[in-house]
Amino acid sequence: MKKLLVIAWKEIVSRFTDPIVLLFTIAMPLAIAALINLAFEGVVLGEGIPDTNVPVGIVNRDKGGQWGNFGEIFVLAMLPDTEASIFPTELPFELFTAREIEDEGQARRLVEREGLVAVLLIPPDFSEALAAERATVEVYINDRYGFRGVMFGSVVEILANIISTSEATVRATVSVLARDPRTRAQLESGRLNEAMSDLAITAAMPESNPIQIRLLNNPGQSAQVELTRYLAAALAITFTGFTALMGSASLWQEKAQWTLQRMVITPTWPGIILGGKTVGTYLNGLIQMGMLVGGMTAMERLLSRGPSQGAQIDPLGLLVLILALVAAATGVGVIIAGLARTYTQAANYGRAILLLMGLVGGIFFPIELFPRSFDVLSCVTFHHWAMDGYLKLSLGGSVVSILPHTLILTAMGLLSFTIGSWFVRRRIGFF
Amino acid sequence: MAGIITVRKLSKQYNPPDGPMAINEVDLQIQEGEIFSLLGPNGAGKTTLIAILCGLFPPTGGDAIVAGHSVVRNPMAVKHIIGVVPEEIALYPQLSGRQNLRYFGLLYGLSGQELDEAIDDVLTVIGLADRAGDKVGSYSSGMKRRLNVGVGLLHRPQIVLLDEPTLGLDPESRRRVLDLVLQLKRDHGTTILYTTHHMEEAQELSDRVGIIHHGRIIALGTPDELIETIHAGDTLRLHVGESKVSAPLLDALRQVRGVKEVSAEGDAITLSLLHAADVLPEILRIMQEAGIVVSSLTVQQPNLEAVFLHLTGQRLTVMSE
């Protein structure tokens, strides 16, 4: 154990007494953060969203009823380029770009994390409730977007009115009903003709609009993430990944300069050597993160021209998240080092892999902008969990709220280290 | 008598089964307190043998017993006993000389006052006490080499394996390293396995020499014993400047008892002799009688280079370039 700490200490001293390393791991990200601060100070995520093509979602959990699935009418009406779209593409509909989301929880998260301005939530019993008496849909709005969210609420209301008054809606309703196998069977047997007529008459009466709209405000509406903080976090995550990578890649550097062999020929077990270097890399990552967080916080205060618009971040939560993030980054670094054959390979390919992971992980662009197939890919990157956890903390979340993130990151680190060290031992040759 | 290092049928094949045999069934015994040099060109297998003895990787065949411990079965015990000076400068340039020594000292299990004393001793021995606080990156190559040696001596090992420790050094630094090796034996009775491709070093330092070629030990003995085996004599070279060398003069020289061969080329006459000291006065007399002025002369005694040439048909110095 003592030797492990000796090796770890050497890693720290070697790294933080090298001016070049300090320049690239501390000074450079801080300088970039300073420029970002100067350029984007006061800009809040989401404020740059345009007034057209406003991203909204629709979650249709309607299980349908005797008369078919009425929730589907909303979907048909709101999704762009739907063949079955029955509503004219005129204002205010054309201001919104809707996407259908299956999971309500995910949809709410997207609104909370500012991927969507608002989401229409159609409950499972919507069709049954509508047939029986009155049904309610909810519109979950992120108030950060001001009028856009409210306008979406209005659009949903207009839609509901159209559904209840328009002849086209009746036709669509009948069309939807007609596609339902159960309805079709009843129509063919002649048992439903009268009921369909009644439905058309009822729907055509404005005062009988049976759809109630409930507007829900995003509970985290007061919390905002400033762009500078988002980008600072992205920088810190990226550079920590690089530090972890270079720490692990230094195994190859040490092999080339024979210091690794010299360690092996001392009475020290190879596992202790690998463990010591990994612990050293981990501690280097923590120190770097500490310096970056401290530096960026100080810079934010120095350069800030007004009060911060964001919530105070839970320091314990941030600490726990950093501990887990650096563990994951260190583990991934060991895997990359284990797959390489030289220091140059590990460093160059590793940097490319980490940048790609950062891109997919959504630290350069919100992952919501990518096709949905990227969601799964994103989840296997430590960048995703680190940024998601950070955003949760930024929106006022506590250490408990990021528990899943920290557990996943830690597990990612341990698993990566286990796999990576197996590769390293094979590749190095004398480990 | 059992040696402190006994190597039995030691083999190492890289990338078996088709890879090259770096060393092939090497048998060797090194006695306690002796300096044993392994002489051979680059790629002969010297470094591989050292790497196996210090437990860097296992052999593919055979075994070596170092102070009673098998390098195959108990490499960790061997590592406690030996000190290793690798051919490469295995140091951290961003750390100071003292930090490098402290780091490796801790890995050798030293600590506290024992470690501090060991560091001070080594710094004095290698002559770097005044530069101990400077970063190794700022050292000259000679200083780095000396520190490289120093790290291997830090834990006062019973046996020291030095792999080409004078590689790339200027004559002065090289002399310091050689003196250091001699001092280790003289003052501490350390057993030393020294690999080199410089026959002068092997000849000067060694109690015994093993000549290694293509992974096999092809000759083993004291330098004198090895030279004796090839029955080579001295070589006398006479420089005659502008004087004209005639055929009768060369015939006269060939008639001298103890002269084996005479040849002339340019301004020099070269004679192969059994023992230069026995015939030199007679040769100089003949030259004087012939009116030839000898401006300078050199006597070259047989050496390990000649032994290597004799055994392999190749010059050691050429192969190592």
Image (cartoon, rainbow, N blue to C red):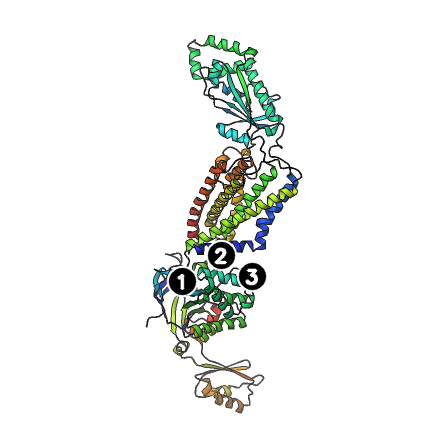
Front-lying residue, A7 or A92 = A7
Report which residue position mark 1 lands on.
Answer: B79
Horizontal and vertical percent position of residue B79? 40, 62
Horizontal and vertical percent position of residue A205? 55, 10
The image quarter in which residue B295 lies: bottom right
* Residue type marked 2: Glu
Front-lying residue, B311 or A47 = A47
Earlier along the polypeptide chain: callout 1 or callout 3?
Answer: 1
Q: Where is the N terminus of chain A found, in terms of image quarters?
A: bottom left
**Disc number at residue B137?**
3
Res. A152 in view: yes
Q: Relative to residue A126, is residue B54 depicted above or below?
A: below
* Residue type marked 1: Lys
- Chain bearing mark 2: A
Marks 1/3: CA–CA distance: 28 Å
How many discs appear? 3
The residue located at (52%, 10%) in the rendering is A202
The image quarter in which residue B307 lies: bottom left
Tag 2 near tag 1, CB within 8 Å? no
Marks 2/1: CA–CA distance: 20 Å
**Disc number at residue A254?**
2
Mark 2 Cα shell of 10 Å, populated few (<14), some (14-19), many (≥20): some
Mark 3 Cα shell of 10 Å, populated few (<14), some (14-19), many (≥20): some
- Chain bearing mark 3: B
